[in-house]
Amino acid sequence: MHVGNRPAIDMTTNNGLPPDVSARLDRIEVLVAANSEQITANSTAIARLEANQAAMSERVNIIAERVDTLAESIRVLVPIIQSIQSDVRGLQLENRRILDILQQRGGNG
């Protein structure tokens, strides 16, 4: 039996739905299940990445602290090293003068 331009719906099969609806619903259920599995896998991967990022951030913070400590040590040591270099240059100059005096005495003696 037809109603207007539409075929009549058999109310005894598929709860009154067209015959291909059941297959479509089965495919949709499969897709929803696959989608749910992928969401779970993605959530697990995101959780792992967040944990790795937190661990990496902690390592970066530790390295930054070490770099700051090293920079402070260098800031303190550079003037000391420069002072020592100046003292060494002064001693080298004094040694040259003493050597010159000794060479002069040796040449006159």
Image: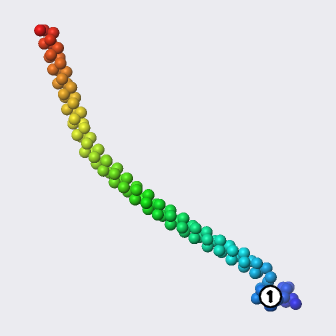
Q: Quadrant of residue 60?
A: bottom left
For the C terminus, the image quarter is top left
Instruction: Provide residue 16's location: percent of width, then percent of height.
Output: 78, 88
Q: Is residue 19 above or below residue 97?
A: below
Q: How many marks?
A: 1
59 or 10, nearer to the observer: 59
Q: Residue furthest left?
A: 109
Residue 26 in the figure: left or right of residue 101: right
Q: Quadrant of residue 34?
A: bottom right
* Within-10-Å neighbours for mark 1: few <14, some 14–19, many 20+: few
Residue 89 in the figure: left or right of residue 1: left
Residue 55 in the figure: left or right of residue 78: right
Q: Which element carries disc 1, helix, strand or loop?
A: loop
88 or 49, nearer to the observer: 49
- Under mark 1, the amino acid is Thr
How is colour applied across the structure in the image? rainbow
Q: Is residue 67 above or below residue 10?
A: above
Q: Residue at x 15, y 20 (%)?
A: 98
Q: Quadrant of residue 88?
A: top left
Q: Is residue 98 above or below residue 74?
A: above
Instruction: Provide residue 8's location: percent of width, then percent of height.
Output: 84, 88
Q: Residue at x 80, y 88 (%)?
A: 13
Task: Give the labeled residue for mark 1.
Answer: 13
For the N terminus, the image quarter is bottom right
Q: Residue furthest right?
A: 1
Q: Residue at x 65, y 75 (%)?
A: 32
Instruction: Provide residue 39's location: percent of width, then percent of height.
Output: 59, 70
Q: Residue at x 48, y 64 (%)?
A: 50
